[in-house]
Image (cartoon, rainbow, N blue to C red):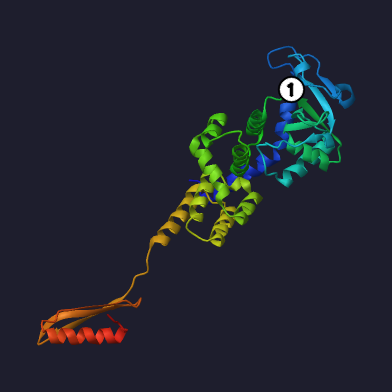
Amino acid sequence: MISKVDRKAAMRASLSAEKRDVNARFAAADAVLSERPGGLGGVPPPQVVLDEAQAGRTFSAENTGPAQQRIVAAPLDRVHENPLNARHIYDPDIVKELAASIATRGQLVPASAIAHPTIPGDYLLIDGHYRKKALAAAGQHSIDLVIRPHEGDLELYRVSWVLNEERSAQSPLDNAFAWRKLLDKGLVQTELQIAELLGVSLSTVNKTIALLSLPTAVLDRMRDRPEKFGVFVGYEITLAAKKVSEIEVLALVNRIIEEDLSSREVGAIRAKLDTGDKRKPKETSRQYKIQHTGQQIGFLKEWDSGKVSLEVVLADPKERAALVAELRSRFGLVD
């Protein structure tokens, strides 16, 4: 039987391998496209690569034939990041690894972009932000782009999300920031529309956006290791945050990172926090019997919290009046 430690070690190794394999996946995709730029089913026609001067400022993918893939080599300073990009968090280690690869082999896979809708001659990335950052880090001054038609802001986000999902999916925290922006900009009106746009469950959208209710310090710590916080782990954290202090939530987040906790383990911790919140400390009480002429006529009871209860039956009106007068005088009671 594989132990829990072995499973966690295997998962960590898998994540590390996936990070190292980012460039290899891009290279594999480029190799396929290079051999068959016209598609997997046809005879590959020649690929046309244009620099900025050849392409002209009015270049659009709409003026290419369906069998050709035309690429523009655009200056980095004329390529703007997608304001509706599906990814918000970038791992600097991946940027460094990709920059080293580009310095050795060049840019293997072109990024996707549209002509900038408000700045003539400039471009707006759809995806390829890691490549743009890596090219700049490698000291390069241009980026190869495949130009797509602009079909609206919502489609700009959707295509970015799909392309990221096909290569290296963004984290739930990325999605939370992006989906909140879609709502804030009015590109969608409800969380249900986001679910329908992307083909995910409404519950996933609800739980993902709920991450943004966490304290800023907690979100900042989660940004350091976003891959540790899947939808279910993140949701357990939001539930815990309703019960405990920010410091305790931050401690839980650090524990998830350091101990590589699963969603089930985080759920168990959160359940204990809920139980602890409801449990009241046991309180000791003491009771004294009040007797008169050998019979019990009442009792006096006290608790550690300071509560005192007196219950007594006095048949004699004079005795009753005397006791009430004494108590009223003791506590300063007036009519």
Front-most of residues 43 and 120: 120
Residue drawn at x 84%, y 41% is 138
Where residue 77 appears, as percent x and y from the top left, is 84, 37
Number of residues whose C-alpha sits closer than 10 Å to that of mark 1, classed few (under 14), some (14–19) or many (20 or more): some
Q: Name, please, the residue furthest toward the front.
A: 335
Residue drawn at x 56%, y 47% is 211
Q: What residue type is labelled 1?
A: Leu
Find numbered disc 1 in the image and state the secondary structure of the residue it sits on: helix
Q: With respect to residue 268, does 205 lie above or below?
A: above
Front-most of residues 113 and 293: 293
Where residue 266 appears, as percent x and y from the top left, is 50, 52
Residue drawn at x 47%, y 54% is 270
Name the quadrant of the C terminus: bottom left
**Which image quarter: residue 189?**
top right
Where residue 312 appears, as percent x and y from the top left, is 17, 79
Where residue 49 appears, as percent x and y from the top left, is 84, 22
Label 1 sits on residue: 33
Q: Name, please, the residue furthest toward the right.
A: 53
